[in-house]
Image (cartoon, coloured by chain):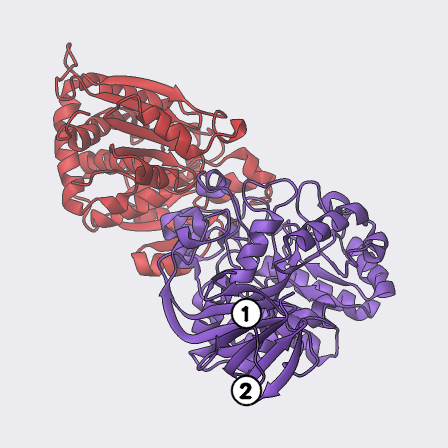
Chain colours: A purple, B red
Amino acid sequence: MTASILIKAATLPDGTTSDVLVRDGAIAELGTVTAKAERTIDADGLRLLPGLVDLHTHLREPGREDAETVLTGSRAAAVGGYTAVLAMANTNPVTDTAEAAERVYDLGRAAGLVDVQPVGAVTKGLAGEELAELGLMARSRARVRVFSDDGKCVHDARVMRRALEYVKAFGGVVSQHSQDPSLAGPTACCHEGELSGRLGLPGWPGVAEEVVVARDVMLARHTGSRVHVAHVSTAGSVEVIRWAKAQGIDVTAEVTPHHLLLTTDLLAGYDPTFKVNPPLRPEEDVRALREALADGTIDAVATDHAPHARHDKEHAFVDAAFGMLGLETALPVVTTVMVEDGLLDWAGVARVMSANPARIAGLDAVHGRPIAVGEPANLTLVDPAAKAVVDRDASVSLSRNNPWHDRLLTGRVVATLLRGTPTVLEGALA
Amino acid sequence: MTRHLLTIDDLTADDIGQIFTTAAEMHDVQNRQVKKLPALRGRTVINLFFEDSTRTRSSFEIAGKWLSADVINLSAKGSSASKGESLRDTVLTVTAMGIDGLVVRHAASGAAEQISRWIDVPVINAGDGTHEHPTQALLDGYTLTRRLGSLEGRHVAIVGDLTHSRVFRSNVKSLTKLGAQVTAVAPPTLMPAGVGAWSKAAGFATAYDLDEVLPQADAVMMLRVQRERMSGGFFPTPREYTVGYGLTRDRLALLKPGTPILHPGPMNRGLEISADAADALDSVVLDQVSAGVAVRMSVLYHLLAGEETQ
């Protein structure tokens, strides 16, 4: 922990300008600060946000350390402005025990760049049949609160019902990968529509997501529990969530940066870089997702950062791995599609990328806090006007499956502070 | 002419005409006692088949041999992903042997296009998943042209499992390029996703009622229906399919006299096509097979004869 950092003339999320003195891991002083600090960061024209929180990251360790490790994924997260990430459970072995959760948690603390919070599996081995040891994971040192079989849907209604009921005992939440396997099976890889018909790719219809979202909000109502909808991708799901929230059902939802910008027509050349689950959707869905994020129907942006070794993407399209990188580019994408278009202001960005995800994950004692004296100094400093072309080879991730390569995006993370310690300075790892 | 033949989109109507003209010349070779032409002497063509095929593979093999190319068949089924090797590695390995052309069949849509981005020799798509089978469409168009003359304004009905058919996808493109009016006939469950928007944009028609379409047709192309589609619930029973969409003996009476009947094979006699239709005087099923060799000779000639040897 460095003793003191003075961030000079930063623009806070509410638009006011302030110096921010960070001392001993916390915000010590705001306003015009005259005190000297060991390090000064000139933040004139820059936005200071609470450190970003990602509800949905795949760090691949244990099991696929050739694609990403907790350390390299933490680096990518820090460079992306994150101070906390939730590490999905679909590793090998699966995070379905307290021991497995503590291992990921400890690897995160050892890396020390972001708070790595393990997500626990809902069912043993992600098989969708028997509940994993949810309570033991919750009681473990990792204090697991978010449970997900992500990559697979908890498709059995009875299992989903029991999981929702059970996690109420410790304030947990089930994050659902909504995909009815009988409507979108394992080979489904292209939004079902004109393009999938022309390309001859197995279709992944929006309705396969929507029927599960609809079922789950009714189960949440019935059980009085809390459900989180991972990577919402269709306008129909947005309608269901909007309705459920109006009924007072305890549902939250996330959208990925790629579903906010990239569209299904990118699949026309069969490039597996653009193969992701749920698939990229048409423009109408993208527009609905942006509006839903702006009006609060969708609570959070979550990356679904999914690194893959190069050779796992060099198969025929239907055989290639699902997923794309996201941690380092999430903030520029949100800046480009939401802020530049006037759909969100910076207070809104702080809400959907920090405060809301921290609250959903139960990390809100430490993350997603207001920028105020006495609060933990988990902070992200952003240049809102910087424009840059994404270069996949400049990534600190181990993988290169980057759908943003060669795209011009606005917004750049200048610095990230985790409990007062810089993890990123001048846009690079500190 | 195109460098690769991955999809019918790679060809203009003029290109197709040129392929047909050359194919007609090649067709004559089939009737000679000595069938070899020297056009591709010293060139090596690999038939890289990731999916089982007898007729397409042997058709390409004969076509290459009659052009004096060295043709090697490689069956790569189950040798790639199952052994952990990526498709790219498999293809780079084969190409590194020093070849002049690659004929590829793969169970995955888009495989040929992906492969063409990894290597610098011409790639000919011999069927990629449910996407395209361009040489099949060319041989179908060639067969029809020989039978009907110009296809301008002619009405072709394509009937069957459209959603899983690469033959349909290539044919609808090439036939419309040649000026034909295409009507795609299938039950709703076997229509490709989004076919409404696609047919509107591409200028073909769709229909659920075969009996309404047949009297107007100048040619009928029946597509194979795989029996395993039943387990997917695409239609209730083979019997019901045949009653709705099979070219039965009764339906032959709906056709104008002399309407050619096509089928890319292998035929499911009794399911999508009756024996009466398959063996009818107007059935051109075997003409398609013989045209297949000529058209593939023509395609190999146009894509490879001008290429520098590696």
Residue A262 image point, x, y percent: 44, 62
Q: CA distance from mark 2 to mark 1?
A: 40 Å
Q: Secondary structure at mark 1?
A: helix
Q: Which residue is mark 1?
A: A235
Instruction: Tell me, yes or no, whether dots 2 and 1 are on the same chain.
Output: yes
Q: Earlier in the sequence, mark 2 or mark 1?
A: 2
Are dots 2 and 1 in contact, CB under 8 Å? Answer: no
Instruction: Give the quarter of the figure containing the N terminus of chain B.
Output: top left
Q: Is residue A389 in sight in this rendering?
A: yes
Q: Which residue is mark 2?
A: A18
Q: Secondary structure at mark 2?
A: strand
Q: Is residue A170 left or right of residue A177?
A: right
How would you rate the neighbour count of disc 2 (Cα within 10 Å): few for under 14, some for 14-19, many for 20 or more? many
Q: Is residue B174 in sight in this rendering?
A: no
Q: Amino acid at mark 2?
A: Ser
Q: How many marks?
A: 2
Looking at the image, which residue is at 35% across and 55% down? B205
Residue B240 image point, x, y percent: 56, 42
Instruction: Give the quarter of the figure containing the C terminus of chain B.
Output: top left
